[in-house]
Image (spheres, rainbow, N blue to C red):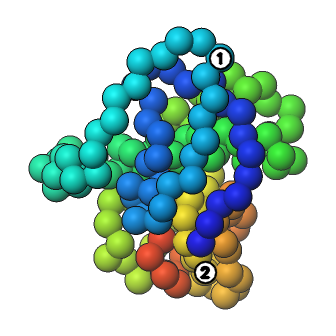
Amino acid sequence: MTFSFEDTDYLQVGYLLGEIGLLTGLPSSTTITCATFVTLYHIPLETMMTAMEMHNTMEDNLEARIWRAVGMRIAVTLLPAEPEYQSWTVDRIHAHVEHSAVPIGYEFENMTIPDYITDIVLLQGEIQDANSKELFIAPRLLPGSCKKLSKVKKTKLFHN
């Protein structure tokens, strides 16, 4: 799966570049143009992989934290186009996705969505509504009617 879109974003301290490549193993195709002087650090892939192995518990999962950051960026881009969010300000959408989480691991075949989760954004891959059998392809905000999901392929979910 590839993502092909142009986006303008204003980066802040601590921002990652190339994280989709790190998380998926796909080549990175990020192009960055800086309007001001910046200081960047290159962290080799091997170092990042070691860090993700070292921080790979339910309480401290670096991969989940990186996916969450990716998910927040994708959600903030997707949600304003959805009818229920068109009246929301960008700040309100940012605050909404700030309460998000990413399930850790790929070991599920089916996932039941608890009632307290209001939105699900599929970040990567494909997933199927277990009841209707409708297939969803990332990036995508899933309908609120999706209460049970079935695994199609290696997939990441972002939920709020």
- Name the residue furthest left: 54
Give the position of the N terminus as an image quadrant. Answer: bottom right
Element class at badge 1: loop
> In the shown orientation, is residue 14 left or right of residue 73?
left
Nearer to me, 46 or 115:
46
Q: Which mark is residue 128?
A: 2
**Label 2 environment density (alpha carbons within 10 Å; few <14, some 14–19, many ≥20):** some
- First in sequence, mark 2 or 1: give its number: 1
107 left or right of 35 in image: left
What residue do we see at 67% from left, 87% from top?
133
Question: How many tags in the picture?
Answer: 2
The residue lying at 49 percent from left, 81 percent from top is 153
Instruction: Give the residue number, with chain letter if any, for mark 1.
Output: 35
Q: Is residue 26 visible?
A: yes
Question: Residue 83's spot in the image, x, y percent?
Answer: 87, 47
Q: Is residue 8 above or below residue 108?
A: above
What percent of the width, then of the height, locates residue 52? 22, 51
Asked if 96 appears above or below 10 in the picture, the reply is below
Residue type at tag 1: Ala
Residue 128: x %, y % from top left: 61, 80
